[in-house]
Structures are given as structure tokens and as C-alpha cells.
Amino acid sequence: MRVAPGAYVPTEMWRSLGPAERHATRVHAAVPRLAPDVVVSHESALALRGFPLLGPWPERVHVVAPRRERDKVDARVHQHAASLETDEIEIVDGLRVAASRRAAVDAVRRRDLRGATVVLDHGLRTGAFTRPQLEACVAARRGVQGSRRAAASVAFADGRAESPGESLSRAVIHSGGLTRPVLQQRIPEVGALAGLVDFWWPEFGVVGEFDGDVKYRDASVRRGRSPEQVVIDEKRREDALRATPGVRTVVRWTWADALRGEPLLQALARAGVR
């Protein structure tokens, strides 16, 4: 597979890579052919660090080119005319790469709340950056296109979301005008443990659970159990939750429900979440 002029990878290797890994491969193929002072930025910097992204990864590699007076865009690379502080540049896999906080802020300036939340929640959860670091970065970028959108997304971000699906769901719930849930709540707070739930609305007695495929397909998550046993265990756990005082019902939803948005909102509304 040709990934850049003069750069190829074996076809079987390319087929085995996920979307983020393919973009990272394009980064490694493109950057050595650019000026030595460019810095990998935006989504490209996030790909090198293993961040999730909602939707497809960019076709173009993104870099900051500090000596350029205006952006340059071709079929494979977008060179942004911008500058970075010394402490915003790190070395990753031998490349000059924007710090996670700067890359995330620049990426979410161009994304809606759903896409921004997936990126920012992940960074906060993994310790890639802190909220004060994000806020300082947004303040430094004030006036740049999309900076207000980035500020709103940073204010909404929450590192307690444990997966991209939970982050997407949070954004959908917020945009739909429903009451903000408590995240990662221990049910019950005392006594026999039914477990930590993804979302909890105590005023309505509703538990919300994002039902991602990974718990059924990923052997490391199943911990030796078959997919069928995981289903059985989840059913027993849900029964225990429903039997807990204060819990009226449990609502589950999938990636498809969260991506479409309306099925998730309707399911919560039917359960009594206002």
C-alpha cells in the first residue's frame, strides 16, 4: 500500500491496522518529507497517542508549520500557520508532536459537543492533561476560530466517563435537555454491592447502562468467560440492580442508539427521566 510518495507498507499489515493506526502510519510517512521544524498537531497528534475519535480519522495529516504565514493544504497534508510554546512540543516516536492538551483543544475547536466530549473525556480519564491545563490552553487560543466551542466543550468534559460510548451518550443526554446524570455511581451506596453503574438519576430512580460490544467480544474484558456467560452475568446484575431500594428501572442502550441520539433520548424519557 502506498501511503505517501515513496512510502509503502505491506498490504496485509495495512489491512490489520485500525483507523487510528492507519492515520498514525500516514503521519510517519508524511512528516519526514516536510520542514524539520513542523510539529504534528490536531487529530494527527491524538492518533499517535492512542486517543479515540468519533467518526472517521482525517484523510490529511495535520501539522503546525511555525514559519508559514498562511495555511498550506494539499492532498495529504494540512500545514497550519500557527505557533506553539516550547512546553507545548514533545517527542513521540521520534517526531515533534504537540502536547496532548494543545492537540485536543485544536481538534475540538472544529467538532461538535459529541465529538469533543469523546476526546476530552478520554484525556482527563487517562491523565493526558488536567482541566486547568485545558482551560489555560483555551484561554491562550482565545479569538481563534472555534475557541468558544472549545471552551464550552472543556467545561462539559468529565474524566469519570469510562469509554467513548459513555462520553457520546453524555453529550446526547445533555443536548437533549435531560437532567444531568451522576456518573459511575455505586449501587447501593452501602450493603451488598450490585456494582458501579454508568449513569444514575436518583431523583427518578433510573439506572442507565451503555451496552458496548467490547464486553462481549474482547477476551481481556470477558476474563475467561464466554460471550454467553457475559450475557447471563449481565442479566443477573441487572436483576440485582432492579431489586435495590430506590431503583425503579434500568435502561440499556447501544452504540447505534447513542449515535442516532433519538432512540437513547426516547428510552430515557419512557423510563421517566425528564
Image (cartoon, grey):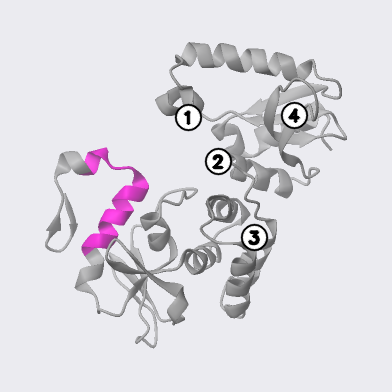
User: Can residue 218 be seen by looking at this rendering?
Assistant: no
Q: Nearer the viewer, mark 3 or mark 4?
A: 4
Q: Which is more N-terminal, label 4 or label 2?
A: 2
Q: Which is more N-terminal, label 2 or label 3?
A: 3
* Percent x, y of residue 138: 60, 72
- 3D distance between C-alphas at marks 3 and 2: 17 Å
The residue that mark 1 highlights is 214
- 3D distance between C-alphas at marks 3 and 4: 25 Å
The residue shown at (71%, 43%) is 173
The residue that mark 2 highlights is 163
- 3D distance between C-alphas at marks 1 and 3: 26 Å
The residue that mark 4 highlights is 207
Q: Which quadrant would the C terminus be assigned to in this image? A: top right
What kind of residue is marked 3? Answer: Ser
Q: Nearer the viewer, mark 3 or mark 2?
A: 2
Q: Which is more N-terminal, label 2 or label 1?
A: 2
The magenta stretch is: 14-29
Q: Closer to the camera, 270 or 91?
A: 91
Q: Which mark is residue 23?
A: none
Does the CB distance between marks 1 and 2 fall below 8 Å?
Answer: yes
Does the CB distance between marks 3 and 2 fall below 8 Å?
Answer: no
* Percent x, y of residue 97: 37, 68
The residue shown at (58%, 70%) is 146
What kind of residue is marked 2? Answer: Ser
